[in-house]
């Protein structure tokens, strides 16, 4: 067996293992989506539910660029999330700080 053939066999084996691991995850995602769609159709769940973590706007005290949240941390002016001082983009909304 040449090194090229060995590499090919190894690559195929890794791809098959990855596929075998991902199939249960993908099936779980598919069944969850089907269940949610059924719940929405039957009225068990509202079509658009509010998410308090992401739907709230920035605090009223944030008028400027970015407000200090204490300990060198910055509060995002767009969504109000508290970010570490070394961040250049918000961890929640990915807007520049």
Image (cartoon, helix red, strand yellow):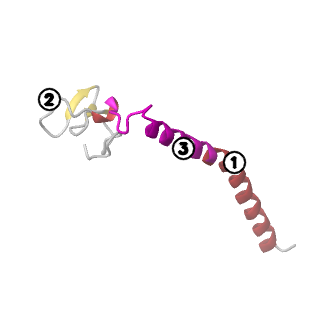
Task: Indicate whether 18 appears above or below 87.
Answer: below
Residue 23 percent across, percent down from the top left: 67, 50
Between discs 2 and 1, the one toward the N terminus: 1
Q: Tell me if residue 61 is in the magenta stretch.
A: no
Residue of label 1 = 21
Between discs 2 and 3, the one toward the N terminus: 3
Residue of label 2 = 60
Residue of label 3 = 34
Is residue 97 found left or right of 15 in the rendered image?
Answer: left
Badge 1 marks a residue whose secondary structure is helix
Q: Residues within 10 Å of mark 3 (few under 14, many from 20)?
A: few
Question: Distance from label 2 to label 3 (Cα)?
Answer: 40 Å
Which SS does the magenta portion mostly show? Answer: helix
Q: Is residue 69 shown to the viewer in this render?
A: yes
Q: Tell me if residue 42 is in the magenta stretch.
A: yes
Badge 2 marks a residue whose secondary structure is loop
Query: Is there CB contact under 8 Å for labels 1 and 3?
Result: no
Badge 3 marks a residue whose secondary structure is helix
Between discs 1 and 3, the one toward the N terminus: 1
Q: Nearer the viewer, residue 46 or 78?
A: 46
Magenta range is 27-52
- The residue at the point 44 percent across, 31 percent down is 44
- The residue at the point 13 percent across, 37 percent down is 64
Is residue 75 found left or right of 13 in the rendered image?
Answer: left
Residue 37 percent across, percent down from the top left: 48, 42
Q: Quadrant of the C terminus?
A: top left
Question: Residue extending furthest top?
Answer: 70
Q: Is residue 84 shown to the viewer in this render?
A: no
């Amino acid at each position: 067996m040449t090194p090229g053939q060995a590499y090919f066999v190894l690559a195929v084996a890794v791809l098959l293992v990855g596929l075998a691991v991902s199939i249960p995850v993908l099936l779980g995602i598919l069944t969850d989506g089907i269940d949610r769609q059924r719940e929405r159709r039957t009225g068990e769940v509202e079509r658009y539910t509010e998410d308090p973590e992401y739907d709230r706007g920035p605090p009223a005290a944030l008028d400027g660029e970015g407000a200090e949240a204490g300990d060198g941390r910055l509060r995002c002016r767009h969504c109000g999330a508290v970010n570490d001082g070394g961040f250049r983009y918000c961890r929640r909304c990915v807007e520049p700080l």
